[in-house]
Image: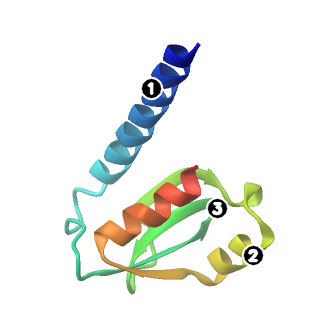
Amino acid sequence: MKKLIIITLSIISLCIAVNFAVLTAKSDERQPLNANRTYIIKNYEGKIACFEEDSTSPFMITEVYVINLPPLDRAMLEDGIEIVGAKNLSRVLEDYRT
């Protein structure tokens, strides 16, 4: 039973990593994520999306539906959450995916 749980969690983790890689690969036209850039995550058509600072179109749209989040998170995403650096962006997105 423990092996089944470990295998299942491993597969889920792999799927999340692949999903993130595919979503970020769609942003080839833009500059790569970097440690000094400011990003904004916010509600975009009902899902969490990532924007570069001062951009009106997202470079990544996640599969996380805002409606499924707690009210405080939904309110923060309506205003937009400012995040500095690619590592911080990845961490925040991972928190919302779990």
Residues at marks 1 and 2, CA–CA distance in whole angstroms: 31 Å
Looking at marks 1 and 2 on the same chain, the residue that comes earlier in the sequence is marked by 1
Residue under the image location 39 percent in, 33 percent down: 14
Residues at marks 3 and 1, CA–CA distance in whole angstroms: 29 Å
Residue under the image location 64 percent in, 61 percent down: 45
**Residue 79, position as x, y percentages in the image:** 63, 84
Q: Within 10 Å of the Cα at label 1, are there few (<14), some (14-19), or many (20+) other Cα atoms?
A: few
Q: Nearer the viewer, residue 40 or 10?
A: 10
Image position of 77 with respect to 65: above or below:
below
**Residue 38, position as x, y percentages in the image:** 34, 83
Image position of 34 with respect to 9: above or below:
below
**Residue 26, position as x, y percentages in the image:** 31, 50
Q: Nearer the viewer, mark 2 or mark 3?
A: 2
Q: Nearer the viewer, residue 24 or 96?
A: 96
Circle 3: element type: loop
Which mark is drawn over residue 28?
none
Residue placed farthest to the front in the image?
A: 2
- Please give the residue where the numbered disc 3 appears in the rendered image: 45
Circle 1: element type: helix
Q: Which quadrant is home to the N terminus?
A: top right
Looking at marks 3 and 1 on the same chain, the residue that comes earlier in the sequence is marked by 1
Amino acid residing under circle 3: Glu
Which mark is drawn over residue 72?
2
Left or right placement of residue 24 versus residue 49 in this view: left
Whether residue 20 is visible here, answered yes or no, is yes
Left or right placement of residue 21 versus residue 11 in this view: left
Residues at marks 2 and 3, CA–CA distance in whole angstroms: 18 Å
- Please give the residue where the numbered disc 1 appears in the rendered image: 11
Whether residue 59 is visible here, answered yes or no, is no
